[in-house]
Amino acid sequence: STILVLHGPNLNTLGTREPEVYGHETLEDIDNRLRQTASEQGHHLLHLQSNAEYELIDRIHEARTEGVDYIIINPAAFTHTSVALRDALLASGIPFIEVHLSNVHAREAFRHHSYFSDIATGVICGLGSHGYDLALQAALKRLH
Ligand code: DQA
């Protein structure tokens, strides 16, 4: 199977960005670990980080024609703003898991609403980068 991992805006700064909130690992560390886990189990993992909404949308459109089986997405700040990204996921018909490093519910009120949670297979937040590993495990299990 093919899994696509999408990371939204500012996640390219992981490692140095508010480490007390987001941890010390870089996005590359996380992506490498996920790619390794997937390949050990005979799957293919693709990933993209973008600060641009349209790039994430275009990637989701491509995923549909490419035959991506599952998406793991941390929409970052777009979580709380993007109807367009939500619509792209709905249009793709590809099941997805929403991940957040921080516990968004323990933070500012504007982070409590997500445009994705009600259409996601599941939502993981507050577990740091381990949330991505758990999401991958869940996606692979569902694909078996
Ligand atoms: C985040 C939480 C969002 O509220 C925030 O805008 C982010 C990261 C997280 O992973 O905890 O950029 O999605």
Image (cartoon, grey):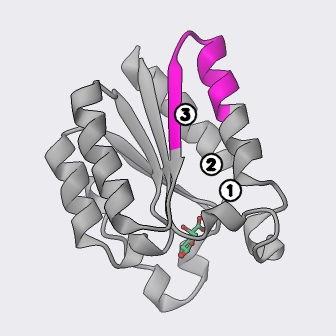
Q: Name, please, the residue furthest toward the top.
A: 42
What range is drawn magenta here? Answer: 34-47
Q: Earlier in the sequence, mark 1 or mark 3?
A: 1
User: Does the Cβ of the disc 3 residue fall within 8 Å of ligand 1?
Assistant: no
Circles 2 and 1: CB atoms closer than 8 Å: yes
Q: Earlier in the sequence, mark 3 or mark 2?
A: 2
Q: Is residue 115 above or below residue 56?
A: below
Q: Residue at x 18, y 51 (%)?
A: 90
Q: Nearer the viewer, residue 75 or 119?
A: 75
| 36 part of magenta stretch | yes
Residue 25 lies, in percent from the top left, at: 81, 54
| 126 part of magenta stretch | no
Q: Secondary structure at mark 2?
A: helix
In three-dimensional space, the C-alpha distance between marks 2 and 1, rounded to whole angstroms, equals: 5 Å
Residue 114 lies, in percent from the top left, at: 37, 71
Q: Quadrant of the N terminus?
A: top left
**Left or right of 137 on screen, residue 12:** right
In three-dimensional space, the C-alpha distance between marks 1 and 3, rounded to whole angstroms, equals: 14 Å
Residue denoted by label 2: 131
Residue denoted by label 3: 136
**Left or right of 38 on screen, residue 91:** left
Q: Quadrant of the C terminus?
A: top left
User: Does the Cβ of the disc 1 residue fall within 8 Å of ligand 1?
Assistant: no
Residue denoted by label 1: 127
Where on the image, by quarter, is ligand 1? Answer: bottom right
Q: Secondary structure at mark 3?
A: helix
Q: Name, please, the residue furthest toward the left.
A: 91
Q: Nearer the viewer, residue 89 or 56?
A: 56
Q: Is residue 16 above or below residue 110?
A: above
At label 3, the amino acid type is Leu
